[in-house]
Image (cartoon, rainbow, N blue to C red):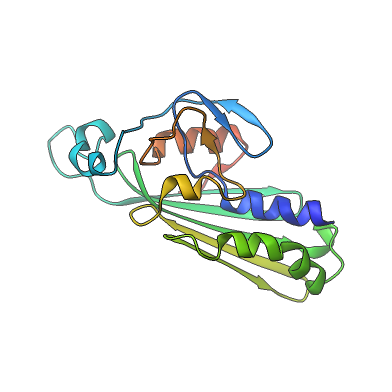
Amino acid sequence: MKKGILSLATLGLGILMIGCSNVKTNNTSATKNSVKTENKADIQESSSIINTESSDDEPVALKTATFEIEQNGVNIQMVYSYMGDLVLKQTTTSIGNYAAMGIDSKEQAQEALASVVEQFSNVKGVTHTIDYQEDQLIENTEVDYSKADLQEVAKLTGSIVDEGSENAKFVSMSQSEKLLLDSGYTKVD
């Protein structure tokens, strides 16, 4: 039962950092491509690399993209706020029915997830809450990439990190979308 709960936390945080070639999670690996840069200042200085301008040299507006999936009794919705290919914020809401997840009670869920809640509690740029209701839990995770240290976020349960991307400083929207769609998510915008 603890395994089922931890998979909720893992799925809830979802895709955080996509790098160049060999993407790995805590337990699995896959191959993906993306854009990366060497230091945080490069994010502002390299708008042409991350495509924050349109072909008419007009600034690209802030956009959102929403993805959903139902998996193992958990409904997950991920909302990305981005400009060009640069993800600025990611908000994930996961709703898991205890019975479908093989959990007997609200108290059992709280006990099993205590270490995950603790892990997320002091990470700059990350807000993580779990609302334990009588028959389900609702997990909300928000990552503000303008404040978060990606290397610190990459260590959290559920993060996907590219091997060799130790210096990556932003999340690629195009590669996040590809990875989500390849993983069975549906784009709903």
- Please tell me which residue is depicted at 50% across the width and 26% down the height of the picture: 32
In the rendered structure, the answer to whether residue 171 lies left or right of residue 69 reads: left
Query: Where 143 falls versus 47 (above or below)?
Result: below
Is residue 71 toward the left or the right of residue 122 in the image?
A: right
Q: Position of residue 1 (x, y in %)?
A: 85, 56
Residue situated furthest left in the rendering: 57
Q: Residue at x 25, y 35 (%)?
A: 51
Tell me if residue 141 comes above or below residue 130 in the rendering. above
* Residue sticking out furthest to the bottom: 134
Instruction: Please provide percent x and percent y for residue 135.
Output: 78, 71
In the image, residue 150 above or below residue 96: above
Question: Is residue 73 left or right of 116 when viewed as pictured?
Answer: right
Tell me where residue 149 appears, x and y as whole percent.
41, 50
Q: Position of residue 103 (x, y in %)?
A: 84, 62
Quadrant of the rendered image containing residue 110: bottom right
- The quarter holding residue 52 reads top left
- Above or below 12: residue 37: above
Residue drawn 45% across the image and 44% down it: 151
Name the foreground residue: 58 vs 40: 40
Q: How many marks?
A: 0
Q: Give me the residue at 55% from left, 46% from top.
A: 155
Left or right, residue 73 beside residue 131 = right
In front of the other: 9 or 163: 163
